[in-house]
């Protein structure tokens, strides 16, 4: 992520972010009338707190706790060897409550861009077993896909230019809950 940026506009404030999560949970509950075999998995890093929020909402809707897992699929990225080296190159599962075999996985991320991170996360899940399905749930879809990956559930879709990014801030990782469109680059 480029650290040299300028905020262009607020896309979601804390209240509209909560509303988007409510709508996403409602859509997921409609897609999955039964909570049996559901597992919510957050992608590192901001997909994890979003997954926690969605799992809590789904647990409330179904009246039972929905299993929650999290995964860091950095090692599975197709550009891993071009990125900054990390010491531990194995897949890092932060939490996995159950097997993925025959489960309906709801994979949660903050921003969908090229699709490469999602592809890596799906590969890491498939290395754990064979789920019945993997459904992608993202807070923001900013377009510019490089792989044929589409979300099943989206909080907000927005168009971005090449020199723009979507920045998600979420507590407890950040000091606020917000989503901004920012301009990035050396001249900002």
Image: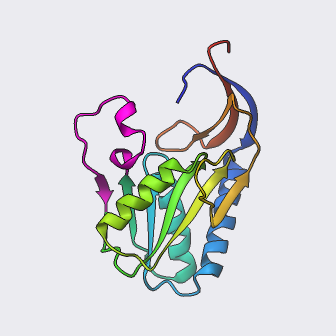
Residue 94 in the magenta stretch? The answer is yes
The image shows a total of numbered marks equal to 0
Image quadrant where residue 85 sits: top left
Q: Going 58% across and 78% down the picture, which residue do you hit?
A: 61
Does residue 77 lie above or below 82 as drawn? Answer: below
Does residue 5 lie above or below 70 as drawn? Answer: above
Picture coordinates of residue 11, whole percent (x, y): 74, 42
Does residue 130 lie above or below 152 as drawn? Answer: below
Residue furthest top in the image: 187
Does residue 103 appear left or right of residue 32 in this picture?
Answer: left
Image quadrant where residue 84 sits: top left
Q: What stretch is highlighted in magenta?
A: 73-95
Q: Going 66% across and 50% down the picture, which residue do you hit?
A: 140
Picture coordinates of residue 163, whole percent (x, y): 69, 27
Q: Going 67% across and 12% down the picture, which residue do you hit?
A: 187
Front residue (pair 132, 58): 132
Does residue 116 lie above or below 188 as drawn? Answer: below
Residue 122 in the magenta stretch? The answer is no
Front residue (pair 51, 166): 166
Picture coordinates of residue 97, whole percent (x, y): 31, 69
Picture coordinates of residue 13, whole percent (x, y): 70, 44
Q: In which quarter of the image is the C terminus?
A: top right
Q: Going 53% across and 82% down the picture, which residue do you hit?
A: 62
Does residue 150 appear left or right of residue 45 in this picture?
Answer: right
């Amino acid at each position: 992520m480029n650290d040299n940026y300028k905020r262009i506009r607020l896309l979601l404030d804390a209240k509209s972010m909560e509303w988007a999560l409510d709508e996403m949970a409602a859509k997921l509950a409609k897609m999955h009338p039964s909570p049996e075999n559901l597992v919510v998995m957050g992608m590192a890093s901001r997909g994890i707190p979003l997954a926690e929020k969605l799992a809590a909402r789904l647990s409330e809707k179904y009246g039972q706790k929905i299993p929650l897992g999290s995964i860091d699929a950095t090692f599975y990225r197709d550009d891993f060897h071009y990125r900054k080296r990390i010491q531990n190159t194995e897949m890092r599962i932060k939490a996995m409550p159950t097997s993925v075999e025959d489960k309906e996985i709801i994979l949660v991320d903050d921003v969908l861009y090229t699709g490469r991170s999602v592809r890596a996360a799906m590969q890491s899940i498939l290395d754990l077993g064979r789920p019945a399905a993997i459904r992608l749930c993202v807070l923001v879809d900013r377009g510019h896909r490089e792989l044929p990956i589409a979300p099943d559930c989206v909080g907000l879709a927005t168009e971005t230019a090449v020199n723009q990014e979507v920045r998600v801030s979420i507590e407890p990782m950040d000091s606020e809950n917000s989503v901004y469109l920012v301009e990035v680059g050396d001249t900002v």
